[in-house]
Image (tube, grey):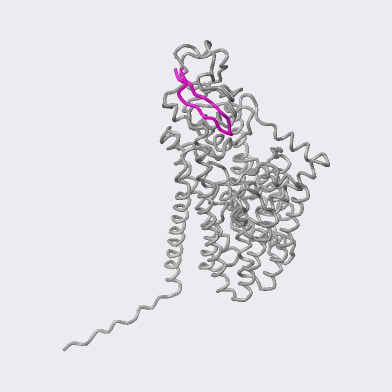
Amino acid sequence: MGPTAVASPRVTSPAAELPDRTRFWALTLLAGWMAQAALRMAVSFQHAMPILVPDESGYLLAARLISGGSPSDLSGRTFYQGGYSLLLAPVYWISDDPATVYRLVLVINALAGASLLVLAYLALRRMGLPRGRACLLAHVTALIPSAIYYSQFALTDAVLPVVVLGWLLLLHGWLGGGGRLHGVAASAAAAYAYSTHARGLIILVAHAGLLVVVALRRRGTIGRDVAAMALVAALGAGAGWALNSWVRAELYPGGVAPLGDWLTDRLTTLDGLAWTVSVAAGQLWHVIVATWGLAGVGLLALAATAFRRAAPPADRLLAGVTLAAIAGVAVATSAALPGEGTVANHAYGRYLACFTPALVAAGLVVLTRARTATAIRAALGTAALTVVTAGIVWLHAGESLSRDFFGVFDFPEICFLTWDWDALNLWRATVTATLLLALATLVRATAGRRTGLIAVAAACVAVELAITGVTVVKVSVPWGRILSFATDLAPAGLRPDDRVGVDYQGVHWRIWVSQAFAVRRKLVPVDPSRGHFLPADLSLVVVPWPAGAGIEGTWPAAPPGWRPVAGNQNQAGSWAAWRR
């Protein structure tokens, strides 16, 4: 009998295990990204047409133009920049069917928005969390209600949070010695943000200010980095300006809404400054309450880092540029916001939503990793900030909060907290958010770091998913049906080759701006009183429907051969469609 072979146990060195660990976490993040994207697609599958007009129509029509398709005429409306539309334009190469285009746009939103998970993970790792905890809290960050909510619409807010968080990460990498490539990429991100929305101008200015500060404080190779970054930012901004100038000339031949006039007036008069301060406070209040105080904790953490001399220089500089960008966006958007008689004029969270993931990530680190005393102080400071901002809004807005038009689609997270879908309950929302933050802090203080982290993360995810589900049922679906019904040309038998005319003077702009996307060719302005002078290729005409008139009487000057085929009487604007 021969000798017995005995297998020796395999010995694996830590160095050999490293690739396996890296692969595991990479696959974990990939699976998480797919789950995040699937969730976003699931909550938006019911949409086939723009709901939030004119914003969505503006971006979609710009995308059609950039793709080489038909232009449109949105003269007199707010200008919607072309950076986001540039991302959407390839969809029109796949299909020109409006419903298909819109659904593919929402797929792009979902894929891009899900990237928040990866960026949040990297940010949390930079803030010192181990991989497991960073992955868990990255899901909490990526699931914040505003990130999910805006992914349902063709709005820059579906991708701008990704751009902003990516910009901050690249800046931190460069400031921390990561090399020129990080800095150049950060400049490209800032330039792209500039091309997508007016908020991007503030981000670009903050970026340029940081470059000046770094150039003055440091010497040597950093100077060449700054020069390269400045060049990329300038070239990118120039390209964005050229794109937007072309889009403006093609889609707004009669000019755009003069928001700059509001900005100048609000920043140079006492009444205007009072408005600006109040609305900016309302924006901060909305972001804090909509995240149950987490964004407020993150905001205070940034302020503490920026002013703490012992903090690493890279952290101080990044905190400073983030605070500057947040303050600039809050002030500029508040000053330029026209008074529309809505509750959202006083407490609107959309403009600061692009910073919310960064703030929430920082807030989660404080609550789960900092010392208990620090977490408690942060919670108390956030509670005070929430009450102060609520007080400013309450004092300035007064009865407007209950008298002005309330759009539930502007306050989905707030309405969930108060369970009132018809009005903004400022103080009830403030108290609820403060109590939730206090509860999270109490769990953290009594359960320890590890158990507290898991408990807080699980509770946050549960609340986030609940808000997402309820918002779809209470806000997205019903409002989508209402607005689609109000503007839908399908009952008129709209065909791909239809040439559609609209009485711009008589039909409410909400109607024709929405219909401009549904029609595949540029709308033709018509004067219904001059029916015999219509372009020969028109096949469908939309005219206003006066109160008390029958549909046959909506176009008294209709030429022979035209008949009414559909109509709609609603609060958004009554209209009738006539076909040749």
Outermost residue on the bottom side: it is 1
Where is 446 relative to 440, above or below?
A: below
Looking at the image, the residue that sits furthest to the left is: 1
Tell me where residue 546 sits by quadrant.
top right
Figure quadrant of the C terminus: top left
Name the spot of residue 538 as percent of width and height, x first. 47, 18
Task: Give how far across and how far down residue 416 sits, in percent.
Answer: 59, 55
Q: Which residues are magenta?
A: 563-580
Q: Nearer the viewer, residue 2 or 136?
A: 136
Q: Residue extending furthest front?
A: 548
**Direction from residue 496 to residue 202 in the image, left or right:** right
Residue drawn at (57%, 36%) of the image: 53
Q: Position of residue 542 (x, y in %)?
A: 52, 23
The residue under the point 64% across, 72% down is 442
Whether residue 571 is in magenta: the answer is yes
- Main secondary-structure element of the magenta-colored stretch: strand
Residue 309 vertical placement versus 333 (above, below):
below
Q: Residue at x 64, y 28 (%)?
A: 76
Q: Is residue 575 above or below residue 381?
A: above
Front in this rendered view, residue 315 or 287: 287
